[in-house]
Image (cartoon, rainbow, N blue to C red):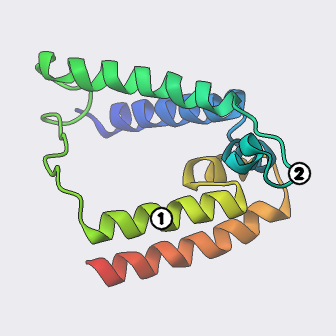
Amino acid sequence: MSNIRAATIALFAGILFAAGLTLGGMMDPRKVQGFLDVGALFGWGGGKWDPSLAFVMGGALVVSLFAFGTVKSHHVPWVGARFELPTRRDIDAKLVVGAILFGVGWGIAGYCPGPALSSLFTGGTDILWFLGAMLPGMLVAKKWFS
């Protein structure tokens, strides 16, 4: 496989992912926070729950299930020697703490890493503050857990 082919496929996948995030509204932190405002379902607070992102996530889940379900039937991937599928199935403290930190950060900021990087092209200083906190946090986590 040539490096140019691998880079072209990665670029196309990244653009497609960013377009999906944009069309699904995942780059708008208010929409994300509206989805995460489950208290509004029960009348707690003055917010309004926005269920639209459930459809975005559901669509992504269907695509992922199809992709992971068919990956073993293909003998050669487009890039690389073989498919690299996760083998770990256990739930440990690192996974739970990481999921909690991710969820809290997503709820507070309205961004997660994919939409945050895609939002760099739309401007706004809030994304710079988020990335300014996210990147050092990722470096600390990598150093701490490696």
Viewer-proximal residue, 10 or 64? Answer: 64
Question: Badge 1 is on which residue?
Answer: 100
Picture layout, residue 65 above or below residue 38: above
Q: Earlier in the sequence, mark 2 or mark 1?
A: 2
Residue 124 screen position, x and y as percent: 85, 57
Task: Please identify the quadrant where the C terminus is shown.
Answer: bottom left
Q: Is residue 33 left or right of residue 66?
A: right
Residue 20 location, quadrant:
top right
Q: For mark 1, does the 10 Å Cα neighbourhood hold few (<14), some (14 to 19), or many (20 or more) residues?
A: few
Q: Is residue 44 left or right of residue 93?
A: right
Q: Amino acid at mark 1?
A: Ile
Res 110 quadrant in image: bottom right
- In the displayed structure, 41 sits above or below 8; it is below
Image point (70%, 33%), residue name: 22
Q: Nearer the viewer, mark 2 or mark 1?
A: 2
Task: Count numbered badges in the picture.
Answer: 2
Give coordinates of residue 69: x percent, y percent. 23, 21
Would residue 32 be found to the left or right of residue 58 on screen?
A: right
10 Å neighbourhood of mark 2: few (<14), some, or many (≥20)? few
Residue 119 tag number: none
When the figure is inspected, residue 61 is found, relative to residue 131, above or below; the finding is above
Front residue of 80/18: it is 18
- Give the residue displayed 89% in from the left and 51% down from the top: 46
Coordinates of residue 116 in the picture (x, y in percent)? 65, 54
Q: Quadrant of the N terminus?
A: top left
Rendering coords of residue 85 (x, y %): 18, 40
In this rendered view, identify the residue nearer to me: 75 or 80.
75
Q: CA distance from mark 2 to mark 1?
A: 25 Å
Q: At label 2, which amino acid type do we have?
A: Gly
For image coordinates 15% across by 52% down, the residue present is 88
Residue at the spot of label 2: 46
Secondary structure beneath dot 2 equals loop
